Amino acid sequence: MSRSPQSEQEFCTECGQFVDQLNEWTGWCKDCSLSTQPNPVSRVERWLIKYADTVEYVMQEQRITAKLAIIEVHATYKATCIICDEPIKHGTHGRHFICSSTPECRKARRRYKYLIYEKGFTKESALAAITPQE
């Protein structure tokens, strides 16, 4: 007794086709499972999610449009380098504090990492050691 090819394959309930294997999470074939995956969130969407309350507050406080509030919040919360005091391109406020645009900044950045990972400094003490004294 020979088996038909369809009896060895699994049935996708989404498209109605017989396939070699179904996705264990969705129960559908590979093509149908890929079409149901959500699109990844873009960098702009992540920023808007993070600063939505701040943008709304600025809109209410200054009585301006959302576009102008976004521009103002973006400029206000721009990360600046502690060495050269310039804005850090694609930097996040509170996360990035040393840029890599000048040789002095790159040197300070390398020294910061060296103090933390090689010498065992805490992040605060390493930051104090590389910060320019005035």
Image (tube, helix red, strand yellow):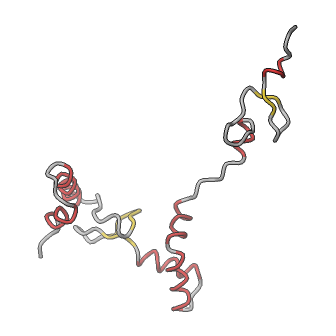
Query: In this rendering, is residue 17 above or below 101?
Result: above
Spot occupied by residue 79 in the image (x, y as percentages of width and height): 35, 70
Residue at 56 percent across and 91 percent down: it is: 63
Residue 61's x, y, as percent?
51, 91
Which x, y percent locates residue 85? 26, 72
Residue 127's image quarter?
bottom left
Who's the residue at 56% across and 88% down the image? 64
Q: Looking at the image, is 109 positioned above or below residue 32? A: below
Judge from the rendering whether residue 44 lies leftward or rightward of residue 100; answer left or right.
Answer: right
Q: Nearer the viewer, residue 102 or 93?
A: 93
Residue at point 86% right, 16% down? 4
65 horizontally vs 4: left or right: left
Vertical comparison of 13 with 66: above or below: above
Q: x%, y% of residue 13?
A: 82, 39
Question: Quadrant location of the N terminus?
Answer: top right
Name the residue located 58 percent from the left edge and 81 percent from the top edge.
66
Which quadrant would residue 99 be assigned to in this image?
bottom left
Position of the C terminus, as image quadrant, is bottom left
Give left or right: position of 97 versus 9: left
Q: Residue furthest front?
A: 1
Q: How many marks?
A: 0
Q: Nearer the viewer, residue 84 or 60?
A: 60
Above or below, 106 against 92 in this view is above
